[in-house]
Amino acid sequence: MVSGAELNIQPDSQALATAAADFIAEQVRANPDLSILVATGNTPMPTYAELARRVRAGELEMNRVVAVQLDEYLGVAEDDPRSLWSWMLRSFVEPLGIRRTVKLEDPRTFEAAIAALGGLDLAILGLGPNGHLGFNEPPSPADAPTRVLELTPESLASNAAYWGELPVPRQAITAGMDIILAARKTLLLVSGAHKRAVLRSALEDGPTPDLPASLLRRTPLTVVADEAAWV
Ligand code: PGA
């Protein structure tokens, strides 16, 4: 049984992108100053491209939004191809004409910046193969703060697919579960058959720190998934 989540299943990844862009656009129309925690990774890219198309077409304005970084590898400079900050700028901030950003570098400064924003309005998240959110690796309790941590073998393996020959850094910094779970709305995007088992588990098991995504069921959660990840 699925409880604590609104489930929106779409036929394929392009339809997923359209549905997710509709959801985000609706939030931005209701509050143009929306503060958004922005996941990178493969899953949200078609959604960001669809938002960018709408911005270019003059159907949507996102230039007052605040984009907040979700996670980063430790010791990776901005001009390194593996920089998640640069990935967020390229895929979200620049194409959407966003002018205000919060960079994740130091846990204390980051948390103060989120507090100054009055918390996050929306968290856009992907789902890790081990149920991680950002780099909140299992186990991550609901009060896990923004922190530096070691990546698990599962995350090292899945992230390797992004960087070709370059090694995946072994340490990362992530927005804490405390910040993610306090977002006023959460949008979890899930695409592909390789996510099916972990999505089921996130929606049906626990909630448990051993599967951080399962803790989202205590929040106002919308899941947009494609049929490959669900049926
Ligand atoms: P993906 O990554 O969107 O590239 O599958 C999700 C994650 O590991 O959090």
Image (cartoon, rainbow, N blue to C red):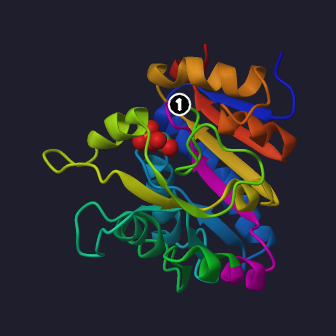
> On the image, which quarter does residue 2 sit in?
top right
Above/below status of 19 relative to 39: above
Is 150 drawn above or below residue 217 in the view shown? below
Residue 229 versus residue 56 in the image, above or below? above
Determine the residue positioned at 73% across, 62% down: 179
Residue 187 pos. (x, y %): 68, 48
Q: Ligand 1: does it lie within 8 Å of the C-beta at label 1?
A: no
The answer to whether residue 227 is left or right of residue 80 is right
In magenta, the rendered stretch is 112-129
Residue 189, position as x, y percentages in the image: 59, 41
- In this orientation, does residue 43 appear? no
To which residue does mark 1 refer? 130
Quadrant of the rendered image containing residue 111: bottom right
Residue 2 is covered by the magenta coloring:
no
Q: Residue at x 40, y 69 (%)?
A: 85
Residue 130 point in image, percent of width and height: 53, 31
Instruction: Residue 57: tell me if it is visible.
Output: yes
